[in-house]
Image (cartoon, rainbow, N blue to C red):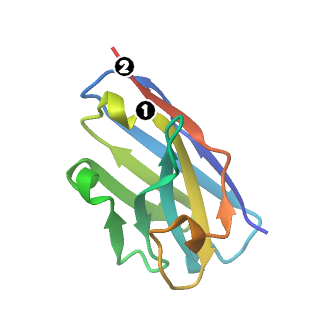
Amino acid sequence: QVQLEESGGGLVQPGGSLRLSCAASGSRFFNQYGLGWFRQAPGKEREFVAAIDWSGNERYYQESMRDRLAISRDDAESRVYLRMNRLRPEDTAVYYCAARSGSGELIRVSDYTYWGQGTQVTVSS
C-alpha cells in the first residue's frame, strides 16, 4: 500500500511560481511507479495536469499548460515534483498526486491506484 502526501501549495500572486512536492511511503518499489498530478477546482471534475513514467524518460502535460509546467521525480527520495510558472487565477484548485505501478496510460484518473489528500493552490492578488 502506497501513501502519498502533497505539500508546497499556498497563496501566490498571478504570474508567480510554485513547486509542489509529493512524498511516497509504504513501498520499496517507488522507481517502478508511474506518477501524475491532477487538479480539481470547486464544482469541476478532477483533471489531468502532468505525469511522468516509471523510467523518468517520458513526460506528459495538459496541452494548455505545457509551457508553464515541469514534472520531475527523485527515486532516491521517493518524491515527485511539479513546478508551475506564470500562475493564473484559473489555476486555483486542489492539486493531487497519484501513483500507479508499472507501465501504462498516465493521463486519466482511472489509470491510477493511489492518491494523496491534495494541496490547495490559490492564485490571487
Image quadrant for the C terminus?
Answer: top left
Measured as percent of width and height from the top left, residue 93 is found at 48, 36
Identify the residue under disc 2.
124
Q: Residue furthest front?
A: 43
> Label 1 near label 2: C-beta < 8 Å?
yes
Measured as percent of width and height from the top left, residue 90 is found at 34, 33
The residue drawn where x is 45% and y is 76% is 53
Whether residue 80 sits left or right of residue 61 in the image: it is right
Q: Nearer the viewer, residue 104 or 47?
A: 47
How many numbered marks does the figure carry?
A: 2
The residue drawn where x is 47% and y is 44% is 20
Residue type at the position of mark 1: Thr
Identify the residue under disc 1.
92
First reached walking from the N terminus: tag 2 or tag 1: 1
Compared to 123, does 116 lie above or below?
below
Residue 79 falls in which quadrant of the image? bottom right
Compared to 91, does 6 lie above or below?
below
Q: Nearer the viewer, residue 90 or 82?
A: 90
Neighbour class for label 1 at 10 Å: few (<14), some, many (≥20)?
A: many
Q: Nearer the viewer, residue 89 or 78?
A: 89
Does residue 78 appear anywhere in the picture?
no
The residue drawn where x is 55% and y is 64% is 109
Q: Residue furthest bottom?
A: 103
Residue type at the position of mark 2: Ser
Secondary structure, mark 2, is loop
Residues at marks 2 and 1, CA–CA distance in whole angstroms: 8 Å
Compared to 25, does 91 lie above or below?
above
Image quadrant for the N terminus?
Answer: bottom right
Whether residue 85 sits left or right of residue 46 in the image: it is left
Measured as percent of width and height from the top left, residue 31 is found at 57, 76
